[in-house]
Image (cartoon, helix red, strand yellow):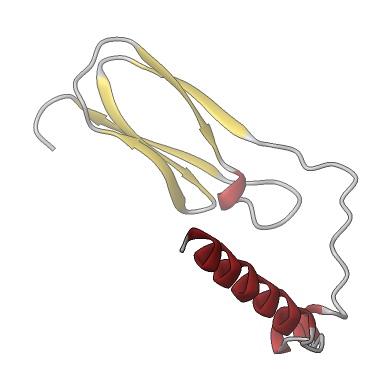
Amino acid sequence: MQKAFLYSVYLFCMLLVLTASGQTKQMRPIDKLYSNIQPLQHKSMPQYFIEANQSGCFYELYVNGRMVFNLFKQVGLMGHTTCINDAILKSGMQEVTVKLYPLGTV
């Protein structure tokens, strides 16, 4: 009984291997779409950050008009570093704006 079961499992595996290897290799449409695209080769990929220390105020940080960080918690002295790469869309000078708000209800 056990030999018959093992034989049937072995036969099933052999049929599976034979049918899988008989398939022709076709290029998927997504492969055709991306076959002509060359990856970008950058010599360097810099990371840009803003480092700020906060005490006694609430604030928001904007880069090129896009908010990258805000803090509206009443905490003691706090420092943080925020990555701003997503807000930089071109080379050159960037506009950084800091909006300060007094402690209290906002």
Count of marks overlaid on the render: 0
Who is closer to the viewer here, 34 or 85? Answer: 34
Quarter of the view holding residue 53: top left
Left or right, 22 with respect to 99, comes to right
In the image, residue 58 sits, relative to residue 15, either above or below, namely above
Left or right, 57 with respect to 32, comes to left
In the image, residue 26 sits, relative to residue 88, either above or below, namely below
Who is closer to the viewer here, 93 or 46? Answer: 46
Quarter of the view holding residue 47: top right
Q: Residue at image x 9%, y 33%?
A: 105
Residue 7 spot, x, y in % from top left:
60, 68
Residue 52 spot, x, y in % from top left:
47, 22
Left or right, 78 with respect to 1, comes to left
Residue 93 spot, x, y in % from top left:
70, 46
Q: Residue at image x 23%, y 16%?
A: 75
Image quarter where the C terminus lies is top left
